[in-house]
Image: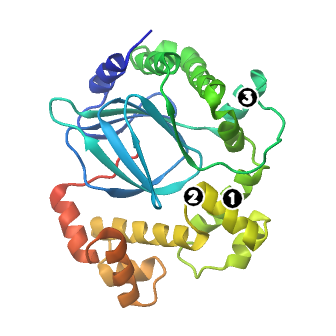
Amino acid sequence: MASAQDLAELIERYADGDGVHETALPRVALIRSSQRTEPLHALHQPALCIVAQGRKRVMLGAEVFIYDAAEFLVVSVDLPVVGEVVEASAERPYLCFRLDLDPASLGAMLIEFGLVGAPDDDRPHPGLTLGPVTPELLDAAVRLVRLLASPKDAKALAPLAEREILYRLASGGLAKTLRQIAMADGRLGQVNRAIGWIKRNFREPFRMEEVCSEARMSQSALHAHFRTVTAMSPLQYQKQLRLQEARRLILSRAADAAGAGHAVGYDSPSQFSREYRRMFGAPPMRDGERLRAQGAVAMVG
């Protein structure tokens, strides 16, 4: 069986410097950081993250999740999170394997191995979950990354290794979570439709009636299920998206504070500045200058 050290050595080989490195393998990225990072906001898409070395803290609303080589992270819907590498150094950098979760691949695997099951419990589960890294799961991840050295073999073997990873997750207790990602007709599918509407319209005034119509749920049901999955209300989710996009515009110098606030839907500059400072800990322009000076980059994974 492969070890976490084997995975760490592979990530060091193929991750050229700090940052998030997309690979030639579909849906696979490798993340490296040679130093601890400050808390950074990002929109985390559905993915599996396995840490080979180091430790990371992720905050979702008021909930805090800490994971390292002993536990994996699974995200089942698009979530605005705050991520912070808390254990890393030049000698022992933070190293992480990320596999983006594809609903079609999940659905095919669940059907093939008879893991679809009966929808006896349609209640959605939290959108962010930790679980133990088993030797079998780690071994499959290592075999997948090793295929970067054999592009000809990867075309045939990478889908098999990815399917085994998904199988290990499902058979290890995450079948319901994965089933919710793959099947669009359950409660998580309805919450996902609400999330999609908010992402498409986050610059516009919030309209709960339209979000409920998109999700095909009552207002009370949507609030309850949305909070279970995302640890926040639909309106709080919209605010997170607005402020993250404004921060991106300011950091890239695409807009000043007033322009960024207006671009993401704020009519009041003072309200924008107040909410921005509450979320990021500093006024917009000072926050942008500080992040540029530090070269800060949000690492999802």
C-alpha separation, residue under disc 3 versus residue under disc 1: 21 Å
Q: Residue at x 32, y 26 (%)?
A: 11
Q: Which residue is denoted by mark 1 in the rendering?
A: 191
Label 3 CA crowd tier, 10 Å (few <14, some 14–19, many 20+): many
Q: Which residue is denoted by mark 3 in the rendering?
A: 110
Please name whichever residue, 85 or 104, is drawn nearer the observer in this view of the structure: 85
Q: Name the amino acid, label 1.
A: Val
Q: Is residue 287 left or right of residue 75?
A: left
Q: Name the amino acid, label 3.
A: Leu
Residue 180: quarter of image: top right
Please name whichever residue, 284 or 17, is drawn nearer the observer in this view of the structure: 284
Q: Is residue 103 left or right of residue 132?
A: right
C-alpha separation, residue under disc 2 versus residue under disc 3: 24 Å
Q: Are marks 1 and 2 in contact (CB under 8 Å)?
A: yes
C-alpha separation, residue under disc 1 versus residue under disc 2: 9 Å
Disc 2 is placed on an element classified as helix
Checking the image for residue 143, the label placed there is none
Q: Earlier in the sequence, mark 3 or mark 1?
A: 3
Q: Quadrant of the C terminus?
A: top left
164 w.r.t. 226: above or below? above
86 w.r.t. 224: above or below? above
Q: Earlier in the sequence, mark 2 or mark 3?
A: 3
Where residue 284 sits: x, y (%)? 28, 76
Q: Is residue 243 left or right of residue 92?
A: right
239 w.r.t. 168: above or below? below
Q: Which residue is denoted by mark 2 in the rendering?
A: 230
Which circle, 2 or 3, is nearer the viewer? 2
Where residue 1 sits: x, y (%)? 45, 9
Where residue 275 sits: x, y (%)? 39, 79
Q: Residue at x 80, y 65 (%)?
A: 216
Disc 1 is placed on an element classified as helix
Q: How is the image coloured?
A: rainbow
